[in-house]
Amino acid sequence: MDDVAGHLGNNIRQLRETRGLTQQQMAKISGVPRPTWARARPFSVEELTRRQRVAILGVEVWLATAEDTVLAKLEWASLSDSERQERDVTAILRIRGTTLDWAYMERWADELGVRHELRRIRQKATDK
């Protein structure tokens, strides 16, 4: 997976530089958020490949899975002490808790260094 992530990041950066595009322009054209290809790390690649196409008000859009949203928000919270991210994760766990792929989330939580936060918020979400 690391090779895929590295190749993805390098290819997109090379394409952007060749065409003289800004990072924002490249993200808009490709439909791939800038942090995904700028970092091109294994979790970001996995998150991109797992995204789901859904219709919202008759418009089809791509969204990250609930599991990947939880993991990303936990990571953001750990980097910024953001209470909002934790509230969002708690809400997702309360709504989707029984349908989430917990093995997937625990594996990536270990990789991202947020396993303690996942367990703590999972407990909090099930207490109420």
Image (cartoon, grey):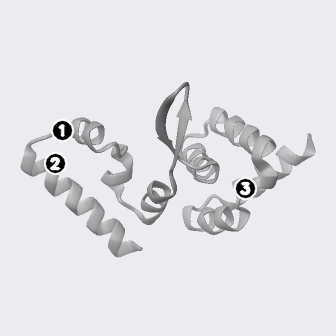
Query: Which tag is nearer the camera, tag 1 or tag 3?
Result: 3
Local crowd size for mark 2, using a 10 Å CA cut-off: few (<14), some (14–19), many (≥20): some
Say if 73 sits above or below 40 in the image: above
Nearer to me, 9 or 83: 9
Q: Are marks 1 and 2 in contact (CB under 8 Å)?
A: yes
Residue 124 is left or right of residue 84, and the answer is right
The amino acid type, in three-letter code, at marker 2 is Arg
Which residue extends farthest right?
127
In the depicted structure, whether residue 101 falls above or below residue 76: below
Residue receiving disc 3: 100
Residue type (three-letter) at the residue carrying disc 3: Leu
Q: Quadrant of residue 27?
A: top left
In the orientation shown, which residue stands out farthest toward the top?
A: 57
Q: Residue at x 75, y 37 (%)?
A: 91
Distance, label 2 to label 3, CA atoms, is 36 Å
Which residue does the numbered mark 2 point to in the structure image? 16
Q: Report, in whole angstroms, how far the alpha carbon at label 1 lies from the one at label 3.
A: 36 Å
Q: Residue 9: image x %, image y %?
A: 28, 60
